[in-house]
């Protein structure tokens, strides 16, 4: 375990903010355009690994050995895989920097289709812990940096907040849905129906590829899918119990691992306001962009438009440098964050009440 845990690390914000181009202004344009904009990424010489889990299921991992002594672990979003465009770009970028890269497919995802009888969910922290054990055994003595996207960001924060021995040394959570009940309700409103149907379609397809899969009853929304499949399959008595126990918001205050939460205030279903409503400990640095949608972050001030990739490289660099604690304080809590950002960014002249 890294000796710098429990010591404040104060990341410096990246010099460039996300500045949306005119054709990608608004949360839905950011979210959708980023998903469909061409994302060239080189083919990488991955080592394919089957990680056996204690319950007989397995995860499909991909590894690339580096030379810097830093391992960057990448965990995809809901219904995705290690072939996701954002994950492929991140892997290529950290490979160029010389880091070891470990890309993880959750149960039944990617090339792991058919390897798992059980599904992953927002509370699958045991699987993340298994990856930590593997990474430390495979790459001993190296600094472990975990990056979770969307649902994996919530899993990662939940793992960190609950504590334990099997944690990464550093963490970055990108657009985490920290309040599952609120996020699921937003998904059934207005244009968010588009994302809701996208998730339901992909999850139902994943389920039917599992060994011994049985036909599913009709589930027109993600909330319905979680009620009839996700919650009972994971051992929760109800959808409400699943959401309550697997939301990371109540656990954020318990995080001791140096962590960056990267979010957008205009995320259409997992907005940064959910995080701003939570007390944050010194170990957590909150970076809430005014614009970016859900994992979009298209910006006109970068040649490739991909501000998220730029920010991830920046924060991995910050988190893996020698700690530089500031006198008298740890990382910004939500109240400090709001106060400081009001002073430095005219785009964030909002009230805390307006975000809740």
Image (cartoon, grey):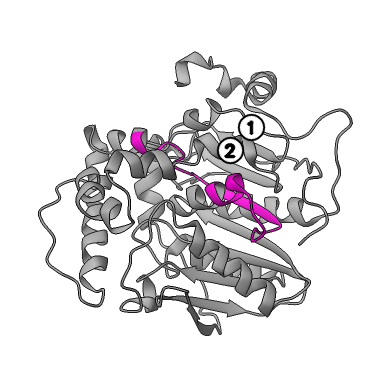
Q: Is residue 160 magenta?
A: yes
Depth check: 259 or 2 in front? 2
Residue 255 occupies which quadrant of the picture?
A: top right
Q: How many marks?
A: 2
Instruction: Find disc 1 in the rendering and name its residue.
Output: 280
In contact (CB < 8 Å): disc 2 and disc 1: yes
Q: Residue at x 51, y 50 (%)?
A: 153
In the rendered image, residue 231, in percent from the top left (x then y), is placed at 29, 51
Q: Residue at x 30, y 38 (%)?
A: 240
Q: Which residues are magenta?
A: 158-181
Q: Residue at x 57, y 34 (%)?
A: 288
Q: Is residue 304 left or right of residue 6?
A: left
* Marks 2/1: CA–CA distance: 6 Å
Q: Which mark is residue 224?
A: none
Q: Is residue 307 visible?
A: no
Instruction: Find disc 2 in the rendering and name its residue.
Output: 252
């Amino acid at each position: 375990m890294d000796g710098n845990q429990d010591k404040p690390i104060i990341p410096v914000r990246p010099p460039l903010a996300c500045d949306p181009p005119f054709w990608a202004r608004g949360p839905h344009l950011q979210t959708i355009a980023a998903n469909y904009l061409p994302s060239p990424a080189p083919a990488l010489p991955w080592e394919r690994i089957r990680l056996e889990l204690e319950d007989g299921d397995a995860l499909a991992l991909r590894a690339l050995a580096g030379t810097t002594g830093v391992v960057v672990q990448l965990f995809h979003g809901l219904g995705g895989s290690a072939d996701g465009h954002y994950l492929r770009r991140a892997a290529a970028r950290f490979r160029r920097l010389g880091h070891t890269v470990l890309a993880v497919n959750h149960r039944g995802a990617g090339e792991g289709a058919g390897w798992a009888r059980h599904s992953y969910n927002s509370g699958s922290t045991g699987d993340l812990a298994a990856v930590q054990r593997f990474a430390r055994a495979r790459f001993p003595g190296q600094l472990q940096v975990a990056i979770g996207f969307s649902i994996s960001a919530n899993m990662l924060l939940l793992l960190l907040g609950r504590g334990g021995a099997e944690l990464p040394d550093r963490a970055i959570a990108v657009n985490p849905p920290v309040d599952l009940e609120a996020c699921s309700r937003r998904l059934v409103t207005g244009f968010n129906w588009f994302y809701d149907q996208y998730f339901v379609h992909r999850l139902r397809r994943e389920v039917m590829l599992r060994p011994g899969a049985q036909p599913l009853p009709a589930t027109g929304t993600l909330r319905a899918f979680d009620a009839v499949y996700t919650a009972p399959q994971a051992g929760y008595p109800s959808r409400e119990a699943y959401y309550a126990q697997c939301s990371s918001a109540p656990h954020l205050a318990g995080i001791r691992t140096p962590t960056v939460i990267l979010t957008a205030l205009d995320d259409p279903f997992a907005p940064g306001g959910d995080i701003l409503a939570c007390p944050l400990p010194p170990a957590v640095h909150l970076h809430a962009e005014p614009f970016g949608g859900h994992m979009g972050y298209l910006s006109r001030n970068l040649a490739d438009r991909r501000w998220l990739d730029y920010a991830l490289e920046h924060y991995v660099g910050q988190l893996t440098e020698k700690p530089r604690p500031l006198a008298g304080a740890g990382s910004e809590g939500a109240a400090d964050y709001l106060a400081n950002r009001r002073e430095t960014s005219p785009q964030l002249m909002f009230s805390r009440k307006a975000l809740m």
